[in-house]
């Protein structure tokens, strides 16, 4: 899959999420908020496993997804398919798992070093769960 195809697939995912998630009255909705560390990763073998173009859920690694640390997934604070909003960075769907050494952490999928630098290493970020797949 070319970089253009990956970007187009990621854009299509984000547009689909925007069309599917339309709150009726955002002023009355209550979101679950989690204080997490936010970083980024690229789909390359040095930063993933031996299959960098696929997530741990079996879906393709495309823009608009993120990986959650195992503690967040195991204790039910996040689930595969949840949609989270990271301030100043955007909206992402949880579709991957991080290495077990990370705790209270999400990793946003990016494609370039420049995008990695923009995300950086952000600690104590208030991340909103705007769509909980279990509800």
Image (cartoon, rainbow, N blue to C red):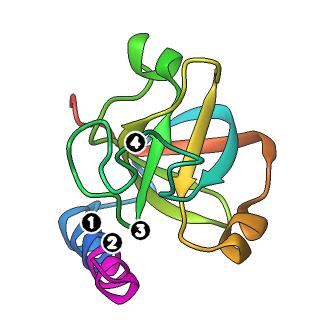
In the orientation shown, which residue stands out farthest toward the top? Answer: 75
Give the mark count.
4
The residue that mark 1 highlights is 17
The rendered magenta stretch, by its main secondary structure, is classed as: helix
Which of the numbered marks, if any, corresponds to residue 63?
Answer: 3
- N-terminal label among 3 and 1: 1
Q: Nearer the viewer, mark 3 or mark 4?
A: 4
Which secondary structure, mark 4? Answer: loop
Q: Which element type, helix, strand or loop, lies under badge 1?
A: helix
Q: Is residue 42 left or right of residue 7?
A: right
Residue 93, given in percent of the width and then of the height, sits at: 36, 51
Of the two numbered discs 3 and 4 on the same chain, state the one appearing first in sequence.
4
For the record, the magenta segment spans: 1-11
Q: Nearer the viewer, mark 3 or mark 1?
A: 3
Name the one closer to the observer, 40 or 129.
40
- The answer to which image quadrant residue 63 occupies is bottom left
Relative side of 45 to 52, left or right: right
Which secondary structure lies at badge 2? helix
Which residue corresponds to the image point at 29% horizontal and 35% vertical from the top-left? 80
| Percent x, y of residue 65 | 40, 56
Task: Decide: few, some or many residues near mark 4? Use Cα within 10 Å; few <14, some 14-19, many ≥20.
Answer: few
Q: Mark 4 points at which residue?
A: 50
């Amino acid at each position: 899959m070319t970089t253009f195809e990956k970007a187009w697939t990621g854009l299509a995912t984000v547009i689909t999420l925007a069309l599917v998630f339309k709150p009726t009255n955002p002023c009355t909705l209550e979101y679950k908020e989690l204080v997490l560390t936010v970083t980024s990763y690229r789909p390359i073998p040095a930063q993933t496993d031996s299959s960098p173009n696929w997530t741990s859920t079996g879906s393709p690694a495309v823009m608009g997804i993120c990986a959650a640390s195992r503690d967040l997934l195991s204790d039910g604070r996040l689930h595969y398919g949840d949609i989270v909003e990271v301030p100043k960075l955007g909206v992402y769907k949880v579709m991957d798992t991080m290495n077990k050494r990370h705790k209270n952490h999400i990793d946003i999928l990016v494609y370039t070093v420049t995008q990695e630098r923009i995300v950086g290493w952000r600690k104590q970020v208030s991340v909103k769960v705007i769509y909980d797949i279990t509800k």
